[in-house]
Image: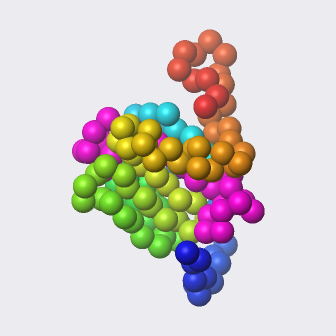
Amino acid sequence: MKKMRSTPELPGMPTEEKSRTLATLLYDKQGEDIQVLDVTGICPIAEHLIVVSGKGQRHVQALADAVLHMASEKKFLSFGVEGYQTGVWILIDLNDIIVHVFQDDMRKFYNIEGLWNEGKRVEWLAATPGEPGTEAQ
């Protein structure tokens, strides 16, 4: 499936910076196992994928809400959301970035990271010496 790019590109935040900003937001909202993949040249519909797990339906929906709120605030181009009602796997299409918010069992089942294993992992959280829990993701 190929996206129609009839909407003109808006000047804005570069993809890598946007991915890091979104990953940090998801971390702040207690998203788990956050992975950012650079799939430029591999995926025809996005440059980066962000994959994150939530603890349950409400947490997954809250993570998606946070992404959508930031996208609206920062005027990120958005093409839509799928799966919000069930809260099992929510896909948010932000044009150059696709955010996958999963409940853990569904994430393991669909294995998005394995599907796009040719993508390069993007380091999004710098390690801070002496602070537990701040290792590079």
Q: Give the colour scheme of this rendering.
A: rainbow
Picture layout, residue 105 above or below residue 44: above
Q: Is residue 58 magenta?
A: yes
Q: Is residue 108 magenta?
A: no
The C terminus appears in which quarter of the rendering? top right
Residue sitting nearer the eye, 85 or 12: 85
Q: Is residue 121 visible?
A: yes
Q: Is residue 44 left or right of residue 95?
A: right
Q: Residue at x 50, y 44 (%)?
A: 111
Q: Position of residue 89 (x, y in %)?
A: 36, 52
Picture layout, residue 84 above or below residue 106: below
Q: Residue furthest top?
A: 130
Q: Residue at x 64, y 28 (%)?
A: 136
Instruction: Give the image quarter of residue 53.
Output: top left
Q: Position of residue 113 (x, y in %)?
A: 57, 44
Picture layout, residue 109 above or below residue 4: above
Picture layout, residue 17 above or below residue 26: below
Q: Residue at x 61, y 23 (%)?
A: 135
Q: Is residue 120 left or right of residue 2?
A: right
Q: Is residue 23 visible?
A: no
Q: Residue at x 64, y 39 (%)?
A: 124
Which residues fall within the magenta stretch? 38-62
The N terminus appears in which quarter of the rendering? bottom right
Q: Position of residue 41 (x, y in %)?
A: 75, 62
Q: Position of residue 85 (x, y in %)?
A: 24, 59
Residue sitting nearer the eye, 76 or 2: 2
